[in-house]
Amino acid sequence: MKKWLTNKPFAHRGLHGPHNGFIENSPSAFRAAAQEGYGIELDVLLSEDEKAVVIHDTSLERLTGLPEVVGNLKAREIEKRTLKGSKDNIPLLKSVLDHLPENTPVLVEIKGDQNRYNELSKAVWQDIKNHKGKIAIMSFYPGIVRYFKERHPDVTRGLVATSIDDGDLPPDYFDVCFQIGTIKALKVDFIAYDISALPNDATLFCRENKIPVLTWTVRTEAQRKHARLNTDNIIFEL
């Protein structure tokens, strides 16, 4: 078991929200999390020129008000886009990692929405391979986790999962038996499971086999209590 995965709670997309006015996945939110002693979780997508961009949505609309698509823009263009109600611009993964203290652990969720698993995984690898701090990749998409298992097996890797089907992923991904099979086949170092779907056979399997169970997204005291009973660490928002 990699104990650093359970030593510090992880701030979901950085420490952001009404309490501090910072925007999700922004440099300010990441700095705030690091200053408070938390780890950070962040999302990455691929720019047109195949750089890892720190943003959750494939469209810039929600966070910038601009009707643009991440995959249609070069990294240098994306870096100029300002996040709504903020002085922060959308960062690249390399920039975020370069500015973080080494003692801040990082979870990089690699999004599969663009269907460019290998290209995005390669871009992430280029940015994390020389990072001095603790870092892990994770994804809902087994193909992305498999990329790292086969090409860069020393990278800490996790499966993101839920059993609640929201229609955004293939039906198999929500099947607990499929998830257990994926955990075994890919020899993941941890699992990050939906707080609303705990506990279940997949998380019980992990705990019985000393595979750390993290949970997302913890927002209430009731959820914190539920997480303490069923998981090893939280990915949270205040």
Image: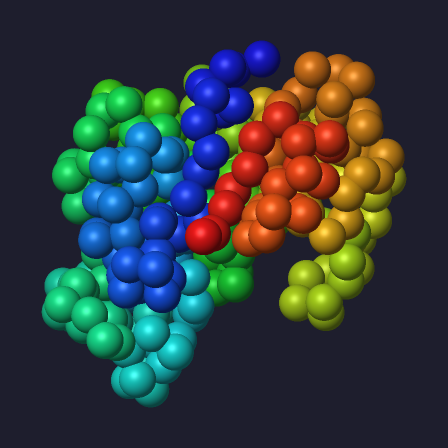
Q: Nearer the viewer, residue 209 or 148?
A: 209
Q: Nearer the viewer, residue 4 or 69?
A: 4
Most foreground residue, 203 or 110: 203
Residue 46 percent location from the top left of the image = 35, 58
Along the line of sight, the residue nearer the viewer: 90 or 228: 228
Residue 202 against residue 211 in the figure, above or below: below
Q: Could you tell me if residue 48 is visible in this image?
A: yes
State the colouring used for the structure image.
Answer: rainbow
Give residue 75's quadrant in the image: bottom left
Position of residue 115 relative to residue 147, above or below, is: below
| Total marks placed | 0
Decide if residue 23 is on the left or right side of residue 219: left
Give left or right: position of 152 versus 138: left
Q: Residue at x 23, y 36 (%)?
A: 35
Q: Quadrant of residue 66?
A: bottom left
Tell me what residue is drawn at x 31 percent, y 42 percent.
33
Question: At 23% across and 24% down in the image, what residue appears?
Answer: 102
Q: Where is residue 153 in the image (x, y as percent from the top left)?
A: 49, 21
Task: Name the image quarter holding residue 20.
Answer: bottom left
Could you tell me residue 179's position as x and y percent? 76, 39
Quarter occupied by the N terminus: top right
Where residue 139 appears, x then y in whole percent?
55, 45
**Residue 132 horizontal side relative to residue 156, left or right:** left
* 11 relative to 140 in the view: left or right: left
As displayed, is residue 138 above or below residue 82?
above
Identify the residue at image location x=58%, y=23%. 189
- Please indicate, yes or no, whether residue 122 appears anywhere in the rendered image: no
